[in-house]
Image: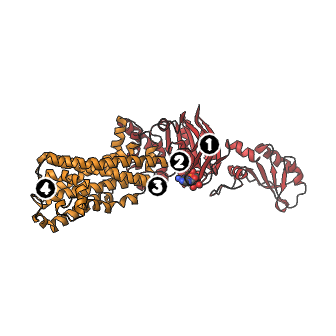
Chain colours: A red, B orange
Amino acid sequence: MTAIEVQGLEREFKGGVKAVQGIDLAVGEGEIYAFLGPNGAGKTTTVRMLTTLLRPTGGRALVAGHDVAKEAAAVRRQIGVALQEAALDPLMSGHELMRLQATLHGLPRAEGRRRADALVERVGLGYAKDRRVGTYSGGMRRRLDLGMALVHEPRVLFLDEPTTGLDPSSRAAIWDEVRRLNDEGTTVFLTTQYLEEADQLADRVGIIDDGRMAIEGTPAALKAQVGQPHLDVCLTDGANDHAEGVLARFGEVRPGIEGVHFQVTLAGGAGDIAPVVRALDEAGLAVAQLNLVNPTLDDVFLAETGRHLEGDQDTGEVAALSLESG
Amino acid sequence: MRAELRAIGALGARSIRNTFRYPRYLGPILIFPTLFLAVNTGGAGGAIDLPGFPEVHGFLDFQLAAGILQASLLAAVMGGTGLALDIELGFTDRLLAAPIRRPTIVLGRLAATFALGMFAAIWFLAIGFAFGAIVKGGVLGVIFVILFGGLTATAFGGIASAIALKSGTASVVQGMFPLVFVILFVSSAFFPAELMQEPSQTIAHYNPVSLVATGIRGPVVSGLRASDTLDGLLGLAIIGGLGFVLSAWGLRARLRAS
Ligand SMILES: Nc1ncnc2c1ncn2[C@@H]1O[C@H](COP(=O)(O)OP(=O)(O)O)[C@@H](O)[C@H]1O
Ligand SMILES: [Mg+2]
């Protein structure tokens, strides 16, 4: 069964801003789907429509089998939502907020209290549960928000930029929790500006730019589409005339700087690394450094939109295999 | 339905707690009207001897209704401000994403405003008793006054909520503060309408707040009288009816804007 089914979804704001311009997607039960795009791409607008907070101006969307426009109440019972700006009342404690959320979802008092107790522990906030949220750090707020979204054990969880602005350890904590939830069967729809996040977490990625879906697929398939991995080869001594010839047996070669640096596309992927090293060795060429460079989602984004994802310094996934051969 | 009432109760409890946790919320509700009462009874106490001033036990007794009205109206404005802050903060989105009925969000606020209005009435009655005022209507009169305090706050709370929902901006709702005093001054809250000059007298005559003032003041200065209570309820029905229509319209506008 499909957890989320979207056809031709559109949203035009007053003043003519077309934030979402006809999106189609389907997310299967138990999947983690990442919606990847730069600031202003239309991620939040899409999430708000899927969570019944914003009316679509075109197209339709089914979440957990219910139409977001016509059966909003039924959708709300099945979903958990953590919005981009964790809207938490700074005057309330974490535990109070959790209990309020339980009541809003119709849990009986005793059960609500039990769930609240369990969830503050689960998101690692047991030690701070009676403190006012106003004193929480950004990471704590996100974790609380995530916990609150789980209070009624939703089938589908929506997370709008769950880790934006968080430090690496807070980010890792959220990722772990998302994986754990998914293992327990929750479908997750998350948006992110971080390539790494989509790559790490998602079963499938949809790249959205300017309100449109640019491309969609598994991270591996998307990257494969942009190109095969290539090997950066750096040899020790200058001017090796036959190096290019040796490397050409494995794939397309681009000679680099000073006659010691080459790039070769590996038709056989990472499995070709050892044969390359052996061949160079047999030809009497000494290798100073080898880097296997895999295409990244940023390369995908670049190929599809002609631009880099803004604000992301992630320039490439480089598996450095430094070899001192002699 | 039970779940809905529990949600209203939980949201109301949250608003009340927050009011007491944040002195900047509670301050205006109680401190302004109390100072006003002190200054007024101290400086204008002689008014009681003016020809045409009703027969009362004391000027403080007469002014208690003014304090309660003022505090209830300010509680209404603070409730509206809280709702607008929730909208600004995005907290209402959290509520809207939950499977509760849309009006529950407003009703939760109004439940708190009702409680704060009653609290204000109790506060002023306590001050009154401490300084020698008497409630002619006895225990039942006290209960009437407290209920009127709560209902007045709720009725005006509907109007404040409407402004909050329509504007979504706390500063706009807070801009109503001066308006509260204007509305009260052109009513019989502080002085008997008969002693006012034109056009205030005519305005006060038709101002529904004057009816509410009668409903609150009656049990204090003249004992329980059906006519005073009916006047008060009529005033509340007018203001509350307006508040209901406006906030329903405001809620619809807010939901449509999304
Ligand atoms: N309420 C609104 N009114 C008008 N334009 C809006 C509104 N909300 C978002 N937008 C515009 O829609 C576009 C997409 O915004 P958004 O969905 O927030 O993007 P993202 O979440 O991917 O950063 C942006 O150009 C933004 O300025
Ligand atoms: Mg966004």
Residue B115, numbered circle = none
Q: Amino acid at mark 1?
A: Ala
Asked if the residue under mark 4 is in contact with the one under mark 1, i.e. CB atoms within 8 Å, the reply is: no
The local crowd at label 2, few if under 14, some if 14 to 19, many if 20 or more residues have their Cα within 10 Å, is some
* Image vertical order of residue A167 relative to residue B48, above or below: above
Residue closer to the observer: B212 or A217: B212
Same chain shared by disc 1 and disc 4: no
Q: What residue is disc 4 on?
A: B129
Image depth: mark 2 or mark 1 in front:
1
Residue with the mark numbered 1 = A202
Disc 3 beta carbon < 8 A from ligand 2?
no
> Label 3 is found on which chain of the structure?
A
Name which residue lies at 72% across and 49% down: A295
Q: Residues within 10 Å of mark 1 (few under 14, many from 20)?
A: many
Labels 3 and 1 within one chain: yes
Chain under disc 1: A
**What's the residue type where badge 3 is placed?**
Ser
Quadrant occupied by the N terminus of chain A: top right
The mark lying in front, picked from 4 and 2, is 4
- Where disc 4 sits, the SS reads helix
Q: Amino acid at mark 4?
A: Phe
